[in-house]
């Protein structure tokens, strides 16, 4: 079960396959453990966003494929609004620069602060002896050919890549989700912007994971351990059935002192 801020986000799920070296645990130092803890919290956040994205687009595919329900209306508008608000806020959190939060940007900042410790020799020690050639190839890819440690410039370029990719979504979230701006966001944001932002965030996360743990995820989308689409294979209401009794918001308001 994936739990974020006390809310169940993906029941009976697991992350998609992780590939790479099984990290040698003897090389885990206190500063390394700190980065690992931040990495895991960011992974949970990205996985939750990817799960929301995947479920939304599965539902859209089901709706589009069924002319009987493929109609504009309250449900479609509600699904759209819930998706946009939820994804926009989660992506905005990934680029939060506040020192008191954990975000993907702050994770990169943590790597930058430890850059003199993130050396080629340290990275090689994460790998099995028979895979040291691959370790060198990976470190060349991460730090640059022949580099002996991760430079601040390399990490800054990753932060810039992340911020640039999420700029439109962050502006939209600031103007229309987290706040209610007097003026609309200056640049229109579409579904493609949201999904591309999430994809870039996952790539930057995987760069960090490969550096910190010598492995990477093959997909950001958690694999559910049950067929959640079963809910669409039964009628929700019979033809002559009204919505069951529920507590309307008016009742909540009237019950207040």
Image: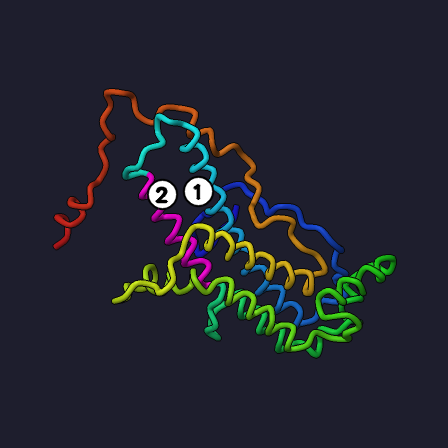
Which quarter of the figure has residue 26? bottom right
Q: Earlier in the sequence, mark 1 or mark 2?
A: 1
For the residues marked 1 and 2, what is the alpha-carbon distance in whole angstroms?
8 Å
Q: Residue at x 39, y 48 (%)?
A: 83
Question: Which x, y percent locates residue 229?
Answer: 47, 32
Find out whether the residues at labels 1 and 2 contact each other: C-beta distance under 8 Å.
Answer: yes
Q: Secondary structure at mark 2?
A: helix
Which quarter of the figure has residue 186? bottom left
Give the left or right position of residue 103, taking residue 25 as reference. Answer: left
Residue 10 vertical position relative to residue 238 in the rendered view, above or below? below
Q: Which residue is mark 1?
A: 56
Front-most of residues 160 and 138: 160
Q: Secondary structure at mark 1?
A: helix
Q: Which residues are magenta?
A: 76-93
Question: Which x, y percent locates residue 165?
Answer: 51, 62
Using the image, tell me which numbered label, if any, was put on residue 227. none
Colouring chosen for the image of the structure: rainbow
- Label 2 crowding class (10 Å Cα cut-off): few <14, some 14-19, many 20+? few
Using the image, tell me which numbered label, if any, was put on residue 79. 2
């Amino acid at each position: 079960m994936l739990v974020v801020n006390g809310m169940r986000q993906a029941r009976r799920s697991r992350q998609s396959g992780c590939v790479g070296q099984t990290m040698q645990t003897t090389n885990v130092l206190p500063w390394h453990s700190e980065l690992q803890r931040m990495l895991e919290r960011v992974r949970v956040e990205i996985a939750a966003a990817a799960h929301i994205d995947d479920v939304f687009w599965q539902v859209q595919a089901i709706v589009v494929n069924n002319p009987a329900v493929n109609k504009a209306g309250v449900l479609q508008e509600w699904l759209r609004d819930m998706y946009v608000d939820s994804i926009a806020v989660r992506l905005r959190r990934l680029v939060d620069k506040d020192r008191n939060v954990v975000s993907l940007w702050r994770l990169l900042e943590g790597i930058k602060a430890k850059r003199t410790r993130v050396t080629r020799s340290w990275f090689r020690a994460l790998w099995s002896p028979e895979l040291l050639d691959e370790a060198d190839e990976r470190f060349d890819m991460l730090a640059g050919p022949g580099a002996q440690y991760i430079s601040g410039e390399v990490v800054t370029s990753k932060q810039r890549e992340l911020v640039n990719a999420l700029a439109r979504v962050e502006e939209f979230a600031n103007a229309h989700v987290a706040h209610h701006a007097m003026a609309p966001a200056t640049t229109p944001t579409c579904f493609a912007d949201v999904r591309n932002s999430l994809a870039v965030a996952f790539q930057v996360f995987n760069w960090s994971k490969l550096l910190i743990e010598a492995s990477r995820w093959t997909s950001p989308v958690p694999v559910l351990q049950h067929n959640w689409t079963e809910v669409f294979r039964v009628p929700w209401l019979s033809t002559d059935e009204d919505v069951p009794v529920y507590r309307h918001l008016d009742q909540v308001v009237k019950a207040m002192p």
